């Protein structure tokens, strides 16, 4: 794969993307996000603060931010906080800092983006996980209330399911108010916010499907095209049609 190629690699916990950034407005991703251009620097504004110029940046989940690069291309890694113990990742991602001078991350991601998967679909590194490819190790997991863990897995398996807090509370043997409180304590976000993010994230599965925007919206469980467009744009800062247009030359690697 030639330098500058577009690549998307993802599983349920980690996403790696190298490709077009476009000109997104403010985005609010529901994962820890590491940005590092293959070359040069990026300008990023996090949480409404003044823009800063940096070689790499880590943004916590659900924190509004906007960014741009000189060539409108980006490399990024998203780490879902569902079961990964983010507190143990400081040596790997310097998660306690929003700014880093680590040019090595950009170089490492550029090498991963340049790998050619066998048969144009298989995972590199002999089938190792994306975590191994990026970090050289399996990321540490955290303990979570098993009732909430089952709800998380259910949403992850089918983000399009119109699952309500009442449904989940009943499955957990809890009142709705107790479930909502426990869920937020374990996931550090609301049940509704978590479910909405996972549904928007599931667009990753459709970027190379060839389906129309209307078909994709229906498949992902959105009630109408406007809601679909607004939700995707809220999280990514981009319109769904622009995401699909920018994905035409994208090599997609599902783990």
Image: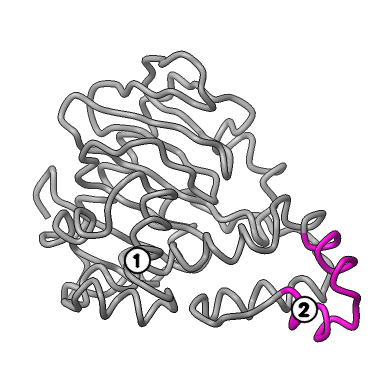
The spot of residue 172 in percent (x, y) is 84, 81
Residue 241's disc number: none
Q: Examine the structure image and report whether residue 236 is included in the region drawn in magenta.
A: no
Q: Residue furthest bottom?
A: 171
Q: Which residue is found at the position 59% from the left and 66% from the top?
A: 195
User: Disc 1 marks which residue?
Assistant: 204
**Chief secondary structure of the magenta span?**
helix
The spot of residue 158 in percent (x, y) is 52, 81
Q: Examine the structure image and report whether residue 180 is included in the region drawn in magenta.
A: yes
User: Disc 2 marks which residue?
Assistant: 166
* Residue 73: quarter of image: top left
The spot of residue 180 in percent (x, y) is 81, 64
From the image, state whether disc 1 or disc 2 is nearer to you: 2
Nearer to me, 121 or 215 = 215
The spot of residue 46 in percent (x, y) is 49, 26
In which quadrant is the C terminus drawn?
A: bottom left
Q: Which type of secondary structure does the marked residue at label 1 adopt? A: helix
What range is drawn magenta here?
165-183
Nearer to me, 75 or 227 = 227
Coloration mode? one colour
């Amino acid at each position: 794969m030639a330098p500058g190629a577009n690549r998307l690699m993802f599983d349920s916990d980690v996403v790696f993307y190298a490709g077009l950034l476009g000109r997104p407005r403010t985005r609010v991703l529901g994962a820890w996000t590491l940005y590092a251009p293959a070359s040069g620097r990026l300008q990023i504004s996090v949480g409404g603060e003044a823009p800063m110029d940096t070689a790499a940046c880590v943004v916590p989940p659900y924190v509004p931010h906007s960014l741009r690069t000189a060539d409108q291309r980006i490399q990024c890694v998203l780490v879902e906080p569902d079961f990964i113990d983010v507190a143990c990742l400081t040596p790997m991602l310097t998660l306690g800092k929003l700014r880093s001078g680590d040019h090595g991350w950009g170089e490492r991601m550029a090498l991963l983006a340049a790998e050619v998967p066998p048969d144009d679909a298989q995972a590199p590194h002999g089938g190792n996980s994306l975590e191994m490819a990026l970090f050289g190790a399996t990321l540490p997991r955290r303990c979570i209330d098993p009732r909430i863990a089952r709800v998380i897995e259910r949403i992850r398996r089918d983000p399009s399911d119109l699952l309500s807090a009442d449904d989940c509370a009943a499955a957990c043997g809890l009142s709705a108010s107790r479930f909502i409180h426990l869920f937020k304590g374990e996931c550090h976000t609301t049940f509704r916010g978590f479910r909405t993010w996972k549904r928007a994230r599931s667009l990753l599965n459709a970027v190379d499907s060839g389906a129309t925007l209307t078909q994709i919206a229906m498949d992902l469980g959105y009630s109408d095209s406007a809601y679909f467009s607004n939700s995707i744009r809220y999280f990514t800062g981009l319109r769904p049609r622009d995401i699909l247009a920018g994905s035409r030359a994208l090599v997609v690697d599902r783990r």
